[in-house]
């Protein structure tokens, strides 16, 4: 009877057993993780940890098949576990904005099952998605505590100087704004002691953007080159039509300091206009950019790095340019046509001169990924032609050279540690063929090569240097000729006929504890020119050799001797200029991160073999710096430096020119940098 009862209970227990198995399998199949937030902010901070709750009934074999992805990057190796929670702490702070987080289960058959997906909103605060303020400040007080036979010294023995670099950024929603504000302080000035440098304020909302301050307007072109001025500009960009339009009003000359504010409003010193840029082709294998620019303005033909007349002159200019990459981006074709109307005498009686310019560029790479042996071979070749009219000039390209016809062929190649560059070029002037001016033709052939062997390592991963250490070599040569091919009608007895040959070589050798390098340059100038009917006497031959060493005596002391020899023989005049320079430098950390110093000595002797000049200069400089307080975000750093310079000049020809002098300074430097 009991046996029958046990046997009869089996059909009842079996369904419960099967149901329990099905329930357990269902739990495994249907589980889902939960993103847990430890705050109620509604957003995350850049370095905040990510905490995922994993149900405890998930078996170990399933946990081992889970992968965590952040912005499609697998970060599983960085995930830790704390009870039922998986923890991920970003190695670097996440950028502001949205980030994608995904938990994936990798099936045994290679399938992927997404267990969870979340969008993480990373913000600075509830008010701003991004808000940052970086400051780097320094203030130096220098006191001259001693001097002898020093000229042109300032009246004040104590001077102050300093700087502050302020950078900030705000962003939220569809807008963002940034600020870059450099400030400078100098007590030894006749103007403002505190001035502003090249500042910039930028703003963007959706397709609109604006900039105020120093900034470039467009990539270099024939009518706008090296133009980074103070002013204002606004840009509208359309992604739908792949087009941008920029309008600008800039200062024509360089500005510095608070004077003239934003740089606009001067009717005698301005450049304004517009730029339109379109991208009709933008594919993975090809792209094309078409841009057009028009500008008008005038400015003094002087400024930073530009010599000319201080009187304002200017006019109008425009250009259209197309630049494309084709054949899987191996072929580049670029062309530009430009026209200017420039009034060279400003308010004078002459009218504006019209002229044109154009340029063509072609480059070609036979292949993009071509492996030769163990290294990839990268080879580029090209040709360029440019013609700039005699009267071609733009107010936004003050340093550009006009009146040129130039053509060149060039190539560059790199393979492993080997590099090779070569070019052939020809240039002529007097494009307008004015009979009152000569026409000069210049030709150039140049080649340079460099080689750096791949470093070798032994089985233990240690650097194997050999007796040469880790070497690198370079060799270059140039041949340049200049010849007057058409003489000026007003001076037919003056013409140029020169040839310059240059050969140079450099070798560097690096060891673990020391390194050295040697270089030599040979130059030969042939000159058959005639000046007003008289032959010139400029033929020369030059040789220059340099030798440099660097020894790490200990981890805290570095010795750097150097030597150079220069010699120029003037063949027509029969004498030689010679110069010998040698010296040594010592960098020392007497107390690491606390007391440091640098000492330099050099001897420079130069003389002429015809005894017209022979002098020797000995120079010694030293500085000793004590870091009294180390800088950190909560307090500024303070250091004191004692520095001095000594100079002894001896003239072997005229003893009355002998001079010996020195000066000593005590400097206090206070520096602080911080971020918010």
Image: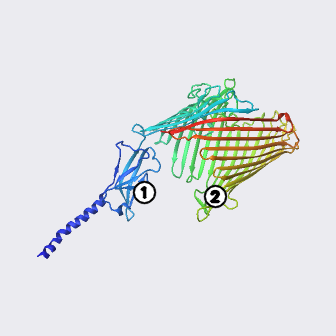
Q: Which residue is mark 2?
A: 415
Q: Position of residue 187 (x, y in %)?
A: 63, 28
Where the N terminus falls, by quadrant?
A: bottom left
**Which residue is found at the position 69% from the left and 23% from the top?**
349
Horizontal side, residue 300 vs residue 498: left or right? left
Which sits in the foreground, 606 or 480? 606
Q: Are marks 1 and 2 in contact (CB under 8 Å)?
A: no
Q: Is residue 348 above or below residue 653?
A: above
Q: Which residue is mark 1?
A: 76
**Which residue is found at the position 64% from the left and 47% from the top?**
589
Horizontal side, residue 310 vs residue 216: left or right? right
Q: Quote the CA–CA distance across marks 1 and 2.
A: 38 Å
Q: Count numbered badges in the picture.
A: 2
Which sits in the foreground, 591 or 535? 591
How did the renderer colour the structure?
Answer: rainbow
Which sits in the foreground, 437 or 378? 378
Q: Position of residue 635 (x, y in %)?
A: 52, 38
Q: Is residue 57 above or below residue 519?
A: below
Horizontal side, residue 408 vs residue 540: left or right? left
Q: Secondary structure at mark 2?
A: strand
Q: Is residue 325 above or below residue 354?
A: below
Q: Residue furthest left?
A: 1
Q: Secondary structure at mark 1?
A: helix
**Which residue is found at the position 53% from the left and 39% from the top?**
673
Q: Position of residue 464 (x, y in %)?
A: 64, 62
Q: Position of residue 469 (x, y in %)?
A: 68, 59
| Quadrant hosting residue 58 | bottom left
- Depth check, mark 1 against mark 2: the one in front is 1
Residue 243 seen anywhere in this rendered image of the structure: yes
Mark 1 and mark 2 lie on one chain; the one further toward the N terminus is 1
């Amino acid at each position: 009877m009991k046996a029958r009862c046990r046997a009869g209970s089996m059909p009842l227990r079996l369904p419960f057993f099967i149901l329990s198995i099905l329930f357990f399998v269902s739990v495994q199949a249907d589980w889902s993780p939960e993103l847990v937030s430890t705050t109620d902010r509604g957003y995350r901070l850049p370095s905040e940890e990510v905490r995922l709750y994993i149900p405890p009934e998930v078996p170990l074999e399933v946990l081992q098949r889970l992968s965590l992805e952040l912005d499609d990057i697998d970060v599983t190796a960085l995930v830790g576990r704390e009870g039922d929670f998986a923890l991920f702490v970003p190695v670097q702070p996440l950028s502001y904005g949205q980030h994608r987080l995904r938990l994936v289960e990798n099936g045994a058959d290679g399938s992927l099952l997404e267990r969870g997906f979340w969008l993480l909103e990373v913000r600075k605060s509830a008010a701003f998605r991004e808000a940052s303020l970086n400051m780097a400040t320094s203030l130096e007080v220098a006191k001259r505590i001693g001097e002898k036979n020093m000229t042109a010294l300032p009246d004040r023995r104590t001077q102050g100087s300093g700087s502050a670099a302020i950078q900030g950024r705000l962003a939220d929603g569809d807008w963002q704004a940034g600020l870059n504000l450099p400030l400078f302080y100098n007590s030894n000035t006749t103007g403002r002691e505190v001035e502003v440098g090249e500042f910039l304020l930028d703003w963007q909302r959706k397709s609109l953007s604006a900039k105020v301050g120093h900034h470039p307007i467009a990539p270099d072109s024939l009518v706008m080159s090296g133009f980074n001025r103070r002013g204002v500009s606004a840009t509208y960009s359309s992604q739908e039509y792949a087009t941008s339009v920029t309008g600008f009003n800039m200062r024509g000359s360089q500005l510095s300091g608070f004077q003239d504010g934003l740089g606009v409003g001067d009717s005698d010193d301005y450049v304004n206009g517009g730029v339109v840029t379109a991208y009709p082709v933008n594919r993975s294998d090809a792209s094309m950019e078409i841009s057009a620019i028009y500008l008008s303005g005038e400015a003094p033909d002087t400024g930073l790095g530009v010599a000319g007349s201080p009187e304002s002159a200017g006019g109008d200019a425009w250009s259209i340019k197309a630049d494309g990459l084709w054949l899987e981006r191996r072929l580049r074709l670029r062309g530009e046509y430009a026209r200017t109307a420039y009034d060279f005498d400003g308010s004078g009686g002459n009218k504006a001169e019209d002229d044109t310019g154009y340029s063509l560029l072609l480059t070609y790479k036979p292949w993009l990924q071509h492996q030769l042996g163990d290294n990839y071979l990268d080879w580029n070749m090209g040709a360029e032609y440019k013609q700039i009219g005699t009267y071609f000039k733009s107010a936004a390209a003050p340093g550009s050279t006009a009146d040129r016809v130039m053509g060149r062929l060039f190539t560059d190649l790199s393979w492993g540690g080997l590099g090779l560059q070569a070019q052939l070029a020809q240039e002529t002037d007097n494009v307008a063929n004015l009979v009152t001016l000569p026409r000069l033709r210049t030709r150039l052939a140049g080649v340079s090569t460099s080689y750096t062997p791949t470093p070798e390592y032994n089985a233990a991963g240690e650097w194997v240097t050999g007796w040469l250490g880790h070497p690198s070599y370079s060799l270059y040569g140039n041949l340049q000729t200049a010849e007057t091919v058409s003489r000026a009608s007003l001076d037919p007895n003056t013409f140029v006929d020169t040839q310059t040959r240059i050969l140079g070589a450099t070798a560097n050798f690096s060891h673990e504890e020391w390194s050295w390098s040697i270089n030599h340059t040979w130059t030969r100038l042939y000159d058959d020119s005639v000046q007003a009917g008289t032959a010139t006497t400029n033929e020369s031959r030059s040789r220059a050799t340099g030798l440099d060493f660097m020894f790490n005596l200990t981890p805290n002391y570095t010795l750097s001797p150097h030597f150079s020899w220069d010699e120029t023989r003037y063949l027509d005049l029969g004498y030689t200029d010679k110069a010998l320079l040698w010296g040594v430098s010592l960098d020392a950390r007497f107390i690491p991160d606390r007391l440091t110093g640098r000492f330099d000595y050099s001897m420079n002797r130069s003389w002429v073999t015809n005894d017209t000049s022979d002098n020797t200069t000995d120079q010694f400089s030293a500085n000793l710096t004590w870091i009294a307080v180390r800088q950190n975000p909560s307090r500024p750093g303070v250091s004191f430096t004692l520095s001095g310079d000594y100079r002894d000049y001896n003239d072997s020809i005229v003893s009355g020119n002998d001079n010996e002098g020195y000066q000593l300074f005590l400097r206090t430097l206070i520096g602080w940098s911080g971020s918010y």
